[in-house]
């Protein structure tokens, strides 16, 4: 069995809403980083977390 960084089960259980608000996206990415490492937190989400003094998981 190949080891994947993608936590498929978590993704299936946590679909990002099509019109997610920034709050929802921040929350999703925080939860995502705790459960899955398929992609790092970058761009607007990372900027917003820095602005709020939040720790970026995995950064
Ligand atoms: Zn993932």
Image (cartoon, rainbow, N blue to C red):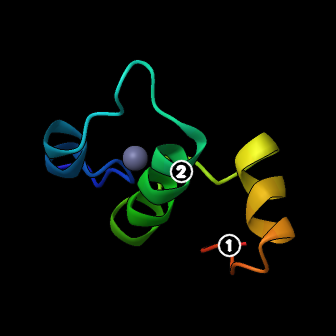
The answer to whether 50 appears left or right of 30 in the picture is: right
Q: How many marks?
A: 2
- Mark before the other along the chain sequence, 1 or 2: 2
Task: Name the residue rendered at 70%, 49% in the picture.
Answer: 45
Closer to us: 26 or 5: 26
Closer to us: 23 or 4: 23
Q: Are marks 1 and 2 in contact (CB under 8 Å)?
A: no
Disc 2 element: helix
Task: Name the residue rendered at 78%, 42% in the picture.
Answer: 44
Q: Residues within 10 Å of mark 2 (few under 14, many from 20)?
A: few
Residue 24: x %, y % from top left: 45, 46
The answer to whether 6 appears left or right of 49 in the picture is: left
The disc label shown at residue 6, or none: none
- Quick one: quadrant of the C terminus? bottom right
| Residue 47 occupies quadrant | bottom right
The disc label shown at residue 23, or none: 2
Residue that badge 1 annotates: 56
The answer to whether 33 appears left or right of 1 in the picture is: right
Residue 23: x %, y % from top left: 53, 50
Residue 39: x %, y % from top left: 56, 47
């Amino acid at each position: 069995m190949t080891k994947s960084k993608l936590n498929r089960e978590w993704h299936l259980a946590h679909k990002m809403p099509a019109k997610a608000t920034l709050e929802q996206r921040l929350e999703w990415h925080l939860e995502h980083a705790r459960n899955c490492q398929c992609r790092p937190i970058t761009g607007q989400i990372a900027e917003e977390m820095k602005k709020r003094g939040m720790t970026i998981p995995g950064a």
